Image (cartoon, grey):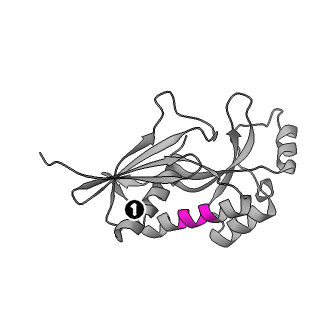
């Protein structure tokens, strides 16, 4: 689990073959992968939506137990926050949402997401609801009690809570990016 904005993508046969060949002395888990590690349809999304250098493709573990290889697309580093204030713009939220939708369309299914992507998808929804970017991240995390999922298995849920004025807005986001607004409650001042 990472709080970087990342998506899990299917890996190409050629990339799997290259990883299997590299499993000797030079093999390092989580290594950076070339654009050929994803399908031409997904490459088109990356070329259309992101400038070169604005993303990285990494080898990723997919599944629990007998897991397999996948590609992790990281489009943004760790969630930038200073004192809980999201230090990224509404453009970053809506950009994450747009890329998620494009990847979903190209793959024919929802991509698995990271905690950071969950925060951005929830923020994009709340910006749409409130019509303002005047939000603060109040809290976020993995909703599972046991240790968080280290792979992109699709079994996790994330919680995200934003502060806006005197209200706290809560979200539950599943690992496939389904964003559920749970509602708002007034904060008490002490």
State whether residue 46 appears in this view: yes
For the N terminus, the image quarter is: top right
Whether residue 46 sits left or right of residue 124 in the image: it is right
- The part of the chain drawn in magenta is 95-101
* Residue at 61% over, 64% down: 101
The spot of residue 115 in percent (x, y) is 51, 46
Q: Is residue 16 above or below residue 56?
A: above
Q: Is residue 71 above or below residue 62?
A: below
Q: Nearer the viewer, residue 181 or 140?
A: 181
Whether residue 16 sits left or right of residue 74 in the image: it is right
Q: Is 89 part of what is drawn in magenta?
A: no
Q: Is 96 part of what is drawn in magenta?
A: yes
The spot of residue 175 in percent (x, y) is 57, 45
The spot of residue 177 in percent (x, y) is 56, 52
Whether residue 49 sits left or right of residue 95 in the image: it is right
Secondary structure at badge 1 equals helix
Q: Is residue 22 above or below residue 137?
A: above
* Residue at 47% over, 70% down: 91
Disc 1: which residue: 126
For the C terminus, the image quarter is: top left
* Residue at 62% over, 52% down: 7
Q: Nearer the viewer, residue 21 or 136?
A: 136
Q: Residue furthest left?
A: 190
State whether residue 54 appears in this view: no
Q: Nearer the viewer, residue 42 or 23?
A: 42
Is the residue marked by circle 1 packed among few (<14), some (14-19), or many (20+) residues within 10 Å?
Answer: many
The spot of residue 147 in percent (x, y) is 51, 28
């Amino acid at each position: 689990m990472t709080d970087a904005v990342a998506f899990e993508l299917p890996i190409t046969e050629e990339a799997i073959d290259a990883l299997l060949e590299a499993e000797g002395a030079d093999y390092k888990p989580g290594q950076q992968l070339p654009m050929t590690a994803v399908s031409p349809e997904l490459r088109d999304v990356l070329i259309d939506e992101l400038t070169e250098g604005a993303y990285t493709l990494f080898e990723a573990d997919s599944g629990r137990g007998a897991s397999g290889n996948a590609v992790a697309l990281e489009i943004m580093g760790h969630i930038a926050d200073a004192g809980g204030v999201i230090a990224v713009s509404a453009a970053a939220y809506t950009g994450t949402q747009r890329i998620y939708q494009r990847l979903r369309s190209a793959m024919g299914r929802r991509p698995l997401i990271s905690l950071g992507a969950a925060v951005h998808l929830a923020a994009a929804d709340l910006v749409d609801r409130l019509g303002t970017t005047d939000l603060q991240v109040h809290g976020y995390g993995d909703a599972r009690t046991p240790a968080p999922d280290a792979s992109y298995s699709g079994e996790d849920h994330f919680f995200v809570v934003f502060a806006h004025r005197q209200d706290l807005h809560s979200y539950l986001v599943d690992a496939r990016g389904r964003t559920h607004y749970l509602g708002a409650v007034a904060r008490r001042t002490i």
